[in-house]
Amino acid sequence: MRSPVRDLAQKDGEESTDRTPLLPGAPQAEAGMRRGLRGASAPVCCSARYNLAILAFFGFFIVYALRVNLSVALVDMVDSNTTLEDNRTSKACPEHSSPIKVHHNQTGVTFPAMHAMWSSWAPPLERSKLLSISYAGAQLGTVISLPLSGIICYYMNWTYVFYFFGAVGIFWFLLWIWLVSDTPQTHKRISHYEKEYILSSLRNQLSSQKSVPWVPILKSLPLWAIVVAHFSYNWTFYTLLTLLPTYMKEILRFNVQENGLLSSLPYLGSWLCMILSGQAADNLRAKWNFSTLCVRRIFSLIGMIGPAIFLVAAGFIGCDYSLAVAFLTISTTLGGFCSSGFSINHLDIAPSYAGILLGITNTFATIPGMVGPVIAKSLTPENTVGEWQTVFYIAAVINVFGAIFFTLFGKGEVQSWALNDHHGHRH
């Protein structure tokens, strides 16, 4: 029996030119090309592209571990007798520990640089898998380094936190220099079969022009669809992982950051979801013939509306802090679906400029981290449940709006402005 969702995807007239993320053209020709890519797929085991994904995974693991260990080590670095006044929190119960604050989404150039590399390395039907594997390292880095840094500080000394993770980072850097190349053409150990497979799958996607088409990029509605989705997702992300713990501490009087296991659960759930959603997304495209745009829409809707629902629900849990932790974990877990949704859509619409596009969208996506907490503070002067419900409502509405906007205006095929050099391949 055919899946009704699949039938719906195939009946979408707007997506008829998007059976693969290749150039728009005759559906029959594209279906044949899709079958050819599946049949000619290079082996996964010991392949250069999956080696790159694994090394990138450990790279992002280290990047986020280095951020977390600084937050943990700072607790031991400062004078233990120093106390911080909090005029907004009740003094009826004493603080049990100094909360560990982990800074999120300070990606800098790391994610855009990786996007730029994947534009030359990721075959269209393997993009979700490869990118979700590489970027999931950030979540696992937080999960492992948070308790490990605490153990090192407790049994040894806070200086050893930096020695340990610094040594691991240097070792990874040496492996990266030795094993990784910018493109398949310059890789010394890639098999001829795999190189031809990657290059043939990207032949009609990459541009060889040197100048960046800034005006068409800034006028591209599909790009702004990603911008809106990225901005909206991060608003809820910051609300969940920054403001919701504050709500639990000040309203429910439970500090989730005092429990290392509960602190790591949201990141662990997001890591698992990113890995699994990447596999599922590419299977839907390769085996079930879902269009690229349909897959990006489905995963973005789940990854944005799901967290919005649980965020609103968090305002009606009463004093049940265990349920609040469950909602926080489920929300961040569902957010992992976006890793195969709008988060990698830059590579679908303009592979050659994916790094630049991610830099643009990520710039707008940092605004919620600065504005969100300020707005939340202004809306909660008395720290009442009703005030916090308003904060959660605003975040949920923004997230739903972003999901709808991306669903309406997102695209899954390479845009014409990204191929205005007669479809030449980048060498």
Image (cartoon, grey):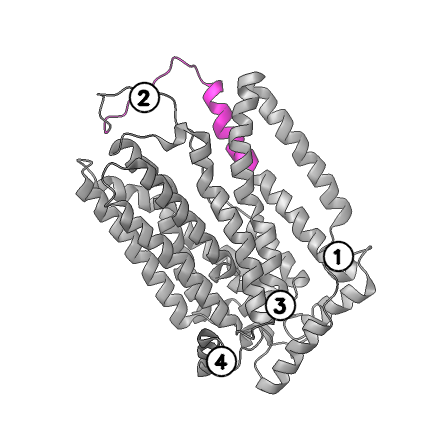
**Crowd rating for badge 3 (residues with CA inside 10 Å; few <14, some 14–19, many 20+):** many
Q: Mark 1 points at which residue?
A: 47
In this picture, is 201 found above or below 163? below
Q: Name the residue under label 2.
A: 95
The amino acid type of the residue labelled 4 equals Gln
What is the C-alpha distance between the residues marked 3 and 1?
16 Å
What is the C-alpha distance between the residues marked 4 and 1?
33 Å
Say which residue appears at 50% left-offset and 43% top-offset: 268
From the image, state whether disc 2 or disc 4 is nearer to you.
4
Magenta region: which residues? 65-88
Q: Mark 3 points at which residue?
A: 125
What is the C-alpha distance between the residues marked 2 and 4?
57 Å
In this picture, is 366 found above or below 28? above
User: Seen in the image, is 45 located left or right of residue 363?
Assistant: right
Label whose residue precedes the other's in the sequence (2 or 4): 4
In which quadrant of the rendered view does residue 289 lie? Answer: bottom right
What is the C-alpha distance between the residues marked 2 and 1?
52 Å
Q: Are marks 4 and 3 in contact (CB under 8 Å)?
A: no
230 vs 245, nearest the viewer: 245
In this picture, is 53 found above or below 344? above
Label whose residue precedes the other's in the sequence (4 or 1): 4
> Helix or strand or loop: what does disc 2 sit on?
loop
The amino acid type of the residue labelled 1 equals Ser
User: Seen in the image, is 144 located left or right of residue 231?
Assistant: right
